[in-house]
Amino acid sequence: MTSTTARTPAFPSKLPNVGTTIFTVMSALAAEHKAVNLGQGFPDFECAPELVNAVTAAMQAGHNQYPPMTGVPALREAVARKIEALHARAYNPNTEITITAGATQAIITAILAIVHEGDEVIVLDPCYDSYVPNIELAGGKAVRVPLTPGTFRPDFAKISAAITPRTRAIIINSPHNPSATIWTAEEMRQLEDLLAPTDILLISDEVYEHMVFDGAEHESAARFPGLAARAFIVSSFGKTFHVTGWKVGTVAAPAALTAEFRKVHQFNVFTVNTPVQHGLAAYLQDPTPYLQLPAFYQAKRDLFREGLAGSRFKLLPSTGSYFQCVDISAISDLNEADFCQWLTREVGVAAIPLSAFYGDGFDQRVVRFCFAKKDETLRAALERLRKL
């Protein structure tokens, strides 16, 4: 009998440049130092009990087996009604709405469905950290175009210059994570005009669609015919209803795009949690919760901004999402990443460096706080931050 040494075979990584995300790192550091975690973007408060009751009722009613691959019909119909009421565009719930396992799965599924080896996809830096790895997994190349430093507005001259014959798609995100800015109707029309003579597809990440402040409106791609005709529009029940751990999202897209999306969806997820879908369908019958969400989060934004008004943090505008960015230049000479580490360890508040959202680590002395927290959590953080 011959002895052999057990060996795990080596193989080339498909994502050689990807490590542990900044969100995991900072959340672990916050836990270690018992810091107030305003880093990772999730609420520390509960969802509405009516929503939990609706999901419980669905379980008790026996909705515990596979749903249709495309999503529970009642939920797809509710999503279509919601989009039409808010944005005046009718989507067929049978052929143009798909329920996904969160927005992150929706985005990678859309990318896998449309991106071929060597295709280029434009992303606007700073951007959410899943976009580029998704493109690379599909065999594509991410083409990073910076948003305007300081204002985070789209630079259409630079976007236009980045378009080549290999450009398959562009990903936009409004309200924007991490900068907390929103695209205007005029900017959406500029994008519509820019893409009109091309076959470039659009992935519109709209997970913070109900967090728009100061009387502004969310300018969904669904509102602009030239964009809607080429767009996968992604949203998230987790963000809207304070249930990020449920991981349920939606994609609205024209029938031809949806057909390709579902080819991938059926093999990388197949179906999404059945009782949660039924519970969400029942809860969506009343639009009040999502219509009141802008005021709910604006009050938290205002509490946080007012609490920092007397500090040396320079507040950047926060017009959408549940984030607040601040300039740290008057407080420290540290770079963003080191400042966030220091802030967590020595001050007891966790934040996220904006440089983590840039491909080249561009550092503009700005960090991001999340204010999707209980008022008492925000006050505890403010008490520590005001000392700086």
Image (spheres, helix red, strand yellow):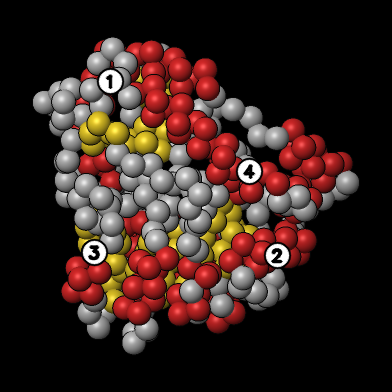
Q: Quadrant of residue 171?
A: bottom left
In percent of the image, x 66 and y 34: which residue is there?
Answer: 47
Describe residue 103's horizontal placement relative to residue 280 as left or right. left
How far is the residue under mark 2 from the one under mark 4? 18 Å
Identity, as a three-letter code, of the amino acid under mark 2: Arg
Tell me whether the residue at label 3 lies in contact with that at label 2, contact meaning CB atoms closer than 8 angstroms.
no
In percent of the image, x 50 and y 63: which residue is there?
Answer: 220
The correct choice, above or below, for 41 with respect to 97 in the image is above
Choose the circle earlier in sequence order: 1 or 3: 3
Q: Nearer the viewer, residue 106 or 364?
A: 364
Q: Which residue corresponds to mark 1?
A: 311
Q: Quadrant of residue 70?
A: bottom right
Quadrant assignment for the N terminus = top left
Q: Position of residue 82 (x, y in %)?
A: 67, 61
Q: Does dot 4 land on a helix, a strand or a loop?
A: loop
Tell me whether the residue at label 2 lies in contact with that at label 4, contact meaning CB atoms closer than 8 angstroms.
no
Quadrant assignment for the C terminus = top left
Q: Nearer the viewer, residue 205 or 23?
A: 205
Q: Position of residue 339 (x, y in %)?
A: 21, 26
Choose the circle earlier in sequence order: 3 or 4: 3
Tell me whether the residue at label 1 lies in contact with that at label 4, contact meaning CB atoms closer than 8 angstroms.
no
Q: Which residue corresponds to mark 3?
A: 155
In percent of the image, x 46 and y 26: which residue is there?
Answer: 303
Residue depth check, mark 2 versus mark 4: number of the one nearer the observer: 4
Identity, as a three-letter code, of the amino acid under mark 4: Gln
Q: Which residue corresponds to mark 2?
A: 81
Residue depth check, mark 3 versus mark 4: number of the one nearer the observer: 4
Q: Residues within 10 Å of mark 2 (few under 14, many from 20)?
A: many
Q: Which residue corresponds to mark 4?
A: 292
Choose the circle earlier in sequence order: 2 or 4: 2
In this view, which residue lies farthest toward the right? 61
